[in-house]
Amino acid sequence: MSNAMSPHPLPIDLPDDFTQTPSASHSVKSDMPPPPDVEPIDHQNAMAANRSQAPKGPLDGVISAIHFLSRICGIASASMFAIAMLIICQLVFMRYVLNESTVWQTEAVIFLMIGATLVGLPYVQLLRGHVNVDLFPMYLKRGARMTLAILTLSCGMAISALFGFYGLELVIEAYEGGWLSETIWAVALWKPYTALPIGFGLLFLQFFADFLSLITRRSTPFDIRDDIS
């Protein structure tokens, strides 16, 4: 058998002509139409190639500053999640080991988890971690793909600006009205509400940085290489 004669014997019995076929791993027949002639997206390599070919100028400082703020948001969000976990551990110890009542722990964990989610929005956008479907943009031509990317970023900026504005309005109203949570802790609600304008405001800036990078050719639509069309 050819499996025994080959320098790297295969672990299973396969036809003799399998090892002689260069594209044996892609030889499965299917009635489905072939996908477009594209390669899997390597986001890190694609972004590195785009940065090496991107134009240089004063705009780089603005984009870098916004990216720095987004990374700060990521650190703050991770810290808030870690603090919430520690508070949960302290709550369990107080209630089930020391048999003592808890006053502020549950509410603090809720506010921290919600705040971490909101503050972490720009960092997730920086990493392209939000839910994204690349199949449709891959089927589009280069011009249509650019148009779709501009439309998507414009919608993102509009929505984040809207939530940021009304979030700031809510914080001001809660501060001036002296709103307190209806619990024993009675925390001033304007403090946890600040996560709304901060998170969505910085998300707007991150969308804006992505928009600037796109229209100045510092990045490609949906991080898909320009040679794929």
Image (cartoon, rainbow, N blue to C red):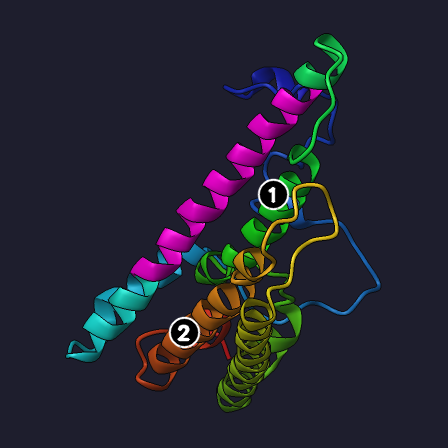
* Residue under the image location 65 percent in, 42 percent down: 185
Question: Picture quarter containing residue 60?
Answer: bottom left
Q: Residue at x 65, y 28 (%)?
A: 88
Q: Amino acid at mark 1?
A: Thr
Pointers 1 and 2 in contact (C-beta within 8 Å): no
* Location of mark 1 (residue): 21
Residue 205 shows which numbered tag?
A: 2
Residue 73 lies, in percent from the top left, at 42, 54
Instruction: Work out which residue is located at the far top of the displayed protein and give it.
Output: 97
Percent position of residue 117, x then y? 59, 53
Q: Crowding at label 1, few (<14), some or many (≥20) Cα neighbours within 10 Å? A: few
Q: Secondary structure at mark 2?
A: helix
- The spot of residue 77 in percent (x, y) is 49, 47
At 70% from the left edge and 36% from the top edge, which residue is drawn?
A: 106
* Circle 1: element type: loop
- Compared to 72, does 85 lie above or below? above
Q: Is residue 86 magenta?
A: yes
- Which stretch is magenta? 68-92
**Residue 166 magenta:** no
Number of numbered discs visible in the structure rendering? 2
- Residue 225 percent across, percent down from the top left: 43, 71
Q: Say which of 130 and 116 sits in front.
A: 116
**Picture quadrant of residue 108:** top right
Amino acid identity at mark 2? Leu
